[in-house]
Image (cartoon, grey):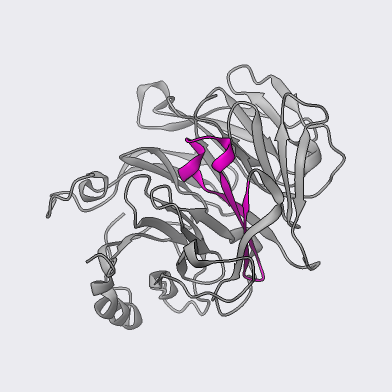
Amino acid sequence: MAEDASSGDEFDDWFIESIKLYNDLHIYELQHATQVIEWTDEKNVCVAGCEFLKKNEILQLSLPQKLYNKDSQGLCPERDFKVEHGGFSERPVYSLRHIQGTSLLVTSGPPDNSLQLWKIGAEDTDVIGLIGSIENRVMENIWSRISVSKMMSSRVLHGSRVNNIQVTDIESKMELYKLDSDIIHVVSNLELLDSNLFLICSMHGGLWLADVRQHPGLIANATTNQQTSTEHWCMGINSFKIGDGFASCKIATLSSERRIMVKDMRDLKKTLSQAKVSFPRQSLQNSFLCVTWSPVVEELLAVSGFDGTVHVYDTSSWNAAEKEVQPLFIHKGHSFSDRGDEAEIPLVTTHTWCPWKPRTILSAATDGSFHVWDWADFHTS
């Protein structure tokens, strides 16, 4: 991997014109596109290939020193990512989670809803090695969504439809819990909140809270209003508040028709605020929809999956009436492909926030571009 700021004339023009908008902007090229960016600790992230009919790399990359230093130190000697560990998957990797406090990774992807278990540094080497798999009680050809908990690191929540969601012990591979439901909606996101509670968002806009201590399990639900047959949804959790207790957690749901609805965990049927985001068109690639809350600044959220950009929004002024809103910042760098004569504009596949820096985001696109950027906040400059 090498830093690259010469991606053709259009990219050069954008880079020169917009560099003043960033405190930091790092441009890298992966060999292949990734749909996952997962923090394993404060200095490392994992990425993985997502292509069919070939081996896909799983890499643990160390951040440049400038990115993981929490204090501003000006110039730093290391300016590039380094491959710390790597391995190969025989299937595309669509979801990847790190088990906190361990060297274990859990992944999922086509052609079925099983999970794969990996060990970073397997057999005391620099290899990420496959060490096993976890089967779902209802096997099918839809890949599973995954969630793991910081408090219960030995467990993984997974499922491809609402009616096959289960909790599995990672070490023994024993099924600890299965959701009792006949709802067959395909899952878009799962989120473990603590050892007992988890959230489900379906592709069709269904939103459920479940408790493993109660039967049949689903204790609250909300269905997104005015949904269309072609509209797909995903979910992001306001993790800024999760540590302060269940009652203060907020949820943002994003649709392929550019709608965002913000809800409070205490009443999923009530919409706190909503908006229509300012992307020029609805999403044609529903699998790339992504909405995330900043872990540092409570009201900021980022949206991607519609084109080659990532939008950042300040939700503090949103209200219950839906209206089109303008972003606080737009990262356009992925829109400029440097892959020869390719006609298609790259699409952003995923993004994630830096856990401790208020305006730093990592993003990736279908052309293999991998960007780390911190936009300048002119309001406080």
Q: Which quadrant of the rendered structure holds the C terminus?
A: bottom left
* x 45%, y 48%: residue: 37
Residue 72 vs 335, above or below: the answer is above
Q: Which residues are magenta?
A: 235-264
Write the residue at 60% across / 75% down.
323
Q: Nearer the viewer, residue 79 or 52?
A: 79
Residue 260 among those drawn in magenta = yes
Q: Closest to the observer: 247 or 159?
A: 247
Q: Position of residue 322 (x, y in %)?
A: 64, 71
On the question of residue 175 being in view, the answer is: yes
Specify whether 168 is left or right of 228: left
In the depicted view, which residue is nearer to us: 295 or 95? 295
Quarter placement of the N terminus? bottom left
The residue located at (33%, 77%) in the rendering is: 11
Residue 96, position as x, y percentages in the image: 53, 41
Q: How many marks?
A: 0
